[in-house]
Image: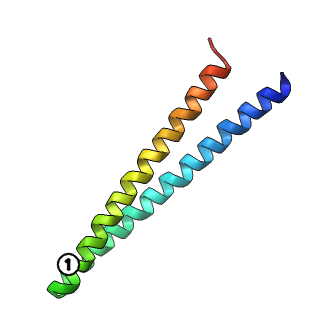
Amino acid sequence: MAARQADIAALWRSLHHASSILAGLASTEEDIAATFTKLAAEDDPDLAMKHQRLAAEAVAAARSARTRACALRKLAETSMAIAYPR
């Protein structure tokens, strides 16, 4: 029983750790998108289009990372609820 509890606790920590990393990645991707957007406003039209496309890709990547982070947090909560029902 103690080994099972230790495994559940390790799983919970790992899920939360991964969630935090993904949240940090999402924040970084948003910073990248903002920078590309700023560059696009200052560039010639051809380069501006490239920077706008890269900004859109960074926004999509940030959204994906946030979605995955939320899914991992929910999985951690569900795992704990199953392991320790009330």
Where's residue 25, x and y in %? 48, 59
Marker count (numbered): 1
Picture residue at 28% right of the left edge, 65% below the top: 56
Residue, far bottom: 44
Where's residue 20, x and y in %? 55, 49
Query: Would residue 9 be found to the left or right of residue 61 on screen?
Result: right
Picture residue at 72% right of the left edge, 33% below the top: 9
What residue is disc 1 on? 49
12 shown above or below 55: above
55 shown above or below 21: below
Q: Quadrant of residue 44?
A: bottom left
Element at label 1: helix
Q: Quadrant of residue 60?
A: bottom left
Residue, far right: 2
Picture residue at 63% right of the left edge, 26% below the top: 80
Picture residue at 40% right of the left edge, 52% below the top: 64
Query: Would residue 13 be found to the left or right of residue 40 on screen?
Result: right
Where's residue 10, x and y in %? 73, 38
Type of amino acid under label 1: Met
27 shown above or below 19: below
Where's residue 1, x and y in %? 83, 21
Q: Quadrant of residue 13?
A: top right
